[in-house]
Amino acid sequence: MLPKAALKTNRQTLMIDADDTLWENNIYFERAIASFISFLNHHHFTPAQVRETLNEIEHEHIGTLGYGLHSFTAALVATFERLSVEPMTPALREAVQGIAQVIAEQPIELLTHVPPTLGELRSRHQLLLVTKGCPVEQTGKLSRSGLEAYFEAVEVVAEKNAESYDAIVEKFGLDRGSTWMVGNSPKSDINPAIAAGLNAVFIPHAKTWVLEEAELCVAPEPQRLLTLERFQLLSEVF
């Protein structure tokens, strides 16, 4: 593995995740889910069982609707329809959709020391924002975050898998040995990047979405996988 000094002096490409890496995201979905479970107020299923059903339905909807607030809203409605003893009425549908809509009204809450850290990294390396989901939603968050100027390019993909990372490498003519994916999700940020022959930096978030959880893979030589406790530590390594 290259020593830390080499990572600072040799120009690297850092592909950086957005949600729960640069700014808070999943906490708002968790609050909405708690509100939904309270609204449903099921007298047979426990909150944990309702959440398990929602997780299953969310996973199903991702396959057809992708990621984003629209897909999440549809999953809440479908979960209500599946579990509620009451028939779905226009008023109930509007109420369930309103629970999800609150997420869109949340301000962007940057994680600690993100702007100064990006400023330091940009002075030495190439930064690309690589996120998944609805392009309009994700670029809208970036615009509201005030972080656009730190990135040379923005890639919003439907799914983060090895094929997506391969396509980004080809599009920008990147050297895999000096390219890193930085993020909080083992499932989307780390494991597929390693599978694509890249390096990766795992920055855990206490509230990572349950559907993004996975066991971290092992990076084969000469690839590298680093784990950092906080985003700001990137500027000490790169």
Image (cartoon, rainbow, N blue to C red):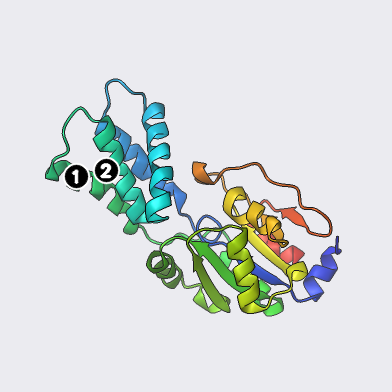
How far apart are the alpha carbons under marks 2 and 1?
A: 7 Å
In x, y percent, where is residue 117? 63, 68
Image: 77 above or below 179 = above
- Most extreme residue toward the left is 90
- Most extreme residue toward the top is 44
Q: Residues within 10 Å of mark 1 (few under 14, many from 20)?
A: some
Q: Is residue 139 left or right of residue 128?
A: left
Residue 77, labelled with which disc?
2
* Residue occupying image coordinates x 64% and y 55%: 192
* Residue occupying image coordinates x 86% and y 63%: 3
Q: Is residue 137 visible?
A: yes
Between disc 2 and disc 1, whose residue precedes?
2
* Residue occupying image coordinates x 24% and y 49%: 98
In x, y percent, where is residue 226? 74, 54
The answer to the question of whether label 2 and label 1 lie on touching residues, with beta carbons closer than 8 A, is yes
Residue 93, labelled with which disc?
1
Q: Secondary structure at mark 2?
A: helix
Amino acid identity at mark 2:
Val
The C terminus - image quarter: bottom right
Amino acid identity at mark 1:
Arg
Image: 191 above or below 2 = above
Q: Quadrant of residue 92?
A: top left
Q: Is residue 115 visible?
A: no
Q: Secondary structure at mark 1?
A: helix
In x, y percent, where is residue 179? 71, 68
Image: 7 above or below 80 = below
Front residue of this view, candidates 119 and 198: 198
Front residue of this view, candidates 217 and 106: 217
